[in-house]
Image (cartoon, grey):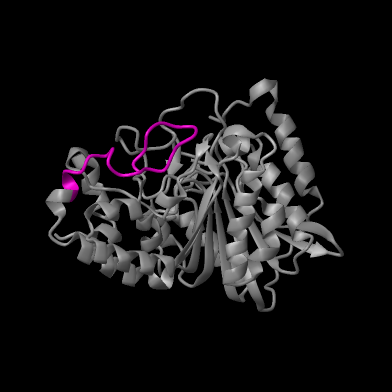
């Protein structure tokens, strides 16, 4: 069943808006010549983010930003109130034009099969020497889909009248014969995505987790993500679109634009909250080796840590979480010499950025490494079993 809109907005109004948005588009199915970079925006928007208007707001900002770009952007858009489409958006004389390439029946955009088809189809239609990927949806780091763990899934407990956040991939209407919402786990993203992206940008909460970036280390040269919640406004697309066809310096600027947008958010208060990081994935193997040495022989010490001893990323819209800062965690167990080596490696592979405040409080930048981590505490044994299915804990913790 489709979600109902607030304020009495009818389905036909939404359908009319979508039709008007796409009515100026024309189909273009011919394979294009090889260009420098094709960027795919994968909008798994069949959820409350689209229902509340955030997808449309971002699409309009993207059109504005693409007015300054001479590059190929492909958009897979799975909305709440219409069927999914594959589109391109191009700059023609300063005006952005949408081309609907393909239309699909209702489907589960939070499924490996659909992700695999869309990514491959994009590269077939628009071959390039380099590719970028934006994943737009809800996100909960490495946590299993529908995790039955106290306070584990960020959207499990709402608390009060606070801003909506983008708390990976969620599809509330996965298709005929399926019921309930659908969510993808990070191992499924790993299996579905091709290797070799220049960057993956997660416009979703909690995805700058060491477990996530390590799992996807062969998928992209760089990963841009937040270790905490991202406001439902998402990325400031009108500012960042021209940067997505650049190199490392431009990707760092994407992070700065994100922080600048939220530092100066017009609504103030809790909306002036944002953390983000750029991770260079080529250094992750060295980091894993360093962390393995730190944790060697310390399994019992780690299991008995108190969750209150290690700094966790603050939350805005939801209850307590399990996303600890990686640097602060290792500071608890490493020797001084070990931590210096770790800090040096980290500084060479990750570039963290944050607003001055988060959730109305000063953000402790001295505790902010840019990567979160889960800690396999003894009291969380039911979640630990799932955790050790991931590559990162298998590498850094002794069996």
Relative height, residue 157 to residue 140 (above, below): above
In this rendering, position of residue 293 left or right of residue 169: left
Give residue 101's quadrant in the image: bottom right
> Farthest residue toward the front?
336
Q: Residue at x 41, y 63 (%)?
A: 216
The answer, for residue 172, to whether it is visible in the render is no
> Farthest residue toward the top?
8
Residue 85 at x, y percent in the picture: 64, 52
In this rendering, position of residue 278 left or right of residue 394: right
The C terminus appears in which quarter of the rendering? Answer: bottom left
Relative height, residue 338 to residue 185 (above, below): below
The answer, for residue 386, to whether it is visible in the render is yes
Q: Residue at x 23, y 59 (%)?
A: 334
Q: Residue at x 58, y 57 (%)?
A: 255
- Between residues 260 and 127, which one lies in front from this camera angle? 260
Which range of residues does the magenta coloring cover?
Answer: 302-322
Residue 295 at x, y percent in the picture: 20, 59
Relative height, residue 21 to residue 341 (above, below): above
- Between residues 138 and 350, which one lies in front from this camera angle? 350
In this rendering, position of residue 353 left or right of residue 339: right
321 inside magenta stretch: yes
Residue 233 at x, y percent in the picture: 62, 42
- Magenta stretch, main secondary structure class: loop
Residue 181 at x, y percent in the picture: 45, 37
Give residue 19's quadrant in the image: top right
Q: Residue at x 27, y 68 (%)?
A: 290
């Amino acid at each position: 069943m489709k979600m109902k809109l607030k304020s009495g907005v009818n389905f036909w109004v939404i359908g009319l808006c979508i039709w008007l948005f796409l009515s100026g588009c024309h189909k273009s199915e011919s394979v294009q010549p090889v260009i420098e970079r094709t960027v795919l925006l994968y909008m798994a928007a069949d959820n409350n983010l689209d229902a509340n208007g955030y997808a449309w707001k971002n699409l309009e900002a993207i059109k504005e930003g693409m007015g300054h770009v001479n590059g190929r952007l492909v958009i897979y858009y799975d909305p709440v109130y219409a069927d999914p489409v594959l589109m391109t958006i191009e700059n023609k004389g300063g005006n952005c034009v949408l081309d609907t390439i393909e239309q699909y029946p209702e489907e589960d955009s939070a499924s490996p099969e659909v992700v695999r088809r869309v990514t491959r189809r994009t590269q077939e239609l628009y071959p390039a020497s380099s590719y970028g990927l934006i994943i737009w949806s809800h996100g909960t780091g490495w946590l299993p889909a529908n995790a039955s763990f106290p306070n584990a899934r960020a959207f499990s407990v709402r608390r009060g009248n606070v801003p909506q956040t983008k708390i990976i991939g969620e599809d509330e209407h996965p298709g005929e014969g399926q019921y309930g919402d659908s969510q993808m786990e990070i191992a499924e993203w790993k299996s579905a995505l091709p290797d070799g992206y220049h960057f993956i940008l997660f416009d979703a909460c909690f995805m700058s987790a060491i477990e996530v970036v390590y799992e996807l280390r062969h998928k992209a040269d760089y990963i841009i993500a937040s270790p905490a919640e991202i406001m439902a406004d998402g990325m400031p697309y009108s500012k960042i679109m021209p940067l997505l066809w650049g190199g490392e310096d431009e990707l760092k600027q994407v992070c700065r634009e994100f922080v600048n947008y939220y530092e100066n958010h017009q609504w103030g208060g809790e909306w002036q909250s944002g953390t983000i990081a750029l991770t260079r994935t080529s250094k992750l193997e060295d980091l894993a080796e360093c962390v393995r040495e730190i944790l060697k022989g310390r399994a019992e010490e780690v299991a008995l840590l108190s969750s209150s001893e290690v700094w966790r990323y603050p939350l805005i819209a939801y209850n307590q979480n399990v996303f600890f800062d990686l640097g602060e965690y290792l500071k608890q167990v490493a020797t001084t010499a070990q931590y210096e080596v770790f800090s040096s490696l980290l500084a060479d592979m990750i570039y963290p950025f944050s607003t001055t405040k988060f959730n109305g409080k000063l953000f402790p930048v001295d505790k902010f490494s840019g990567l979160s981590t889960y800690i396999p505490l003894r009291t969380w044994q039911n979640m630990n079993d799932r955790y050790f299915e991931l590559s990162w804990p298998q590498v850094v913790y002794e069996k």
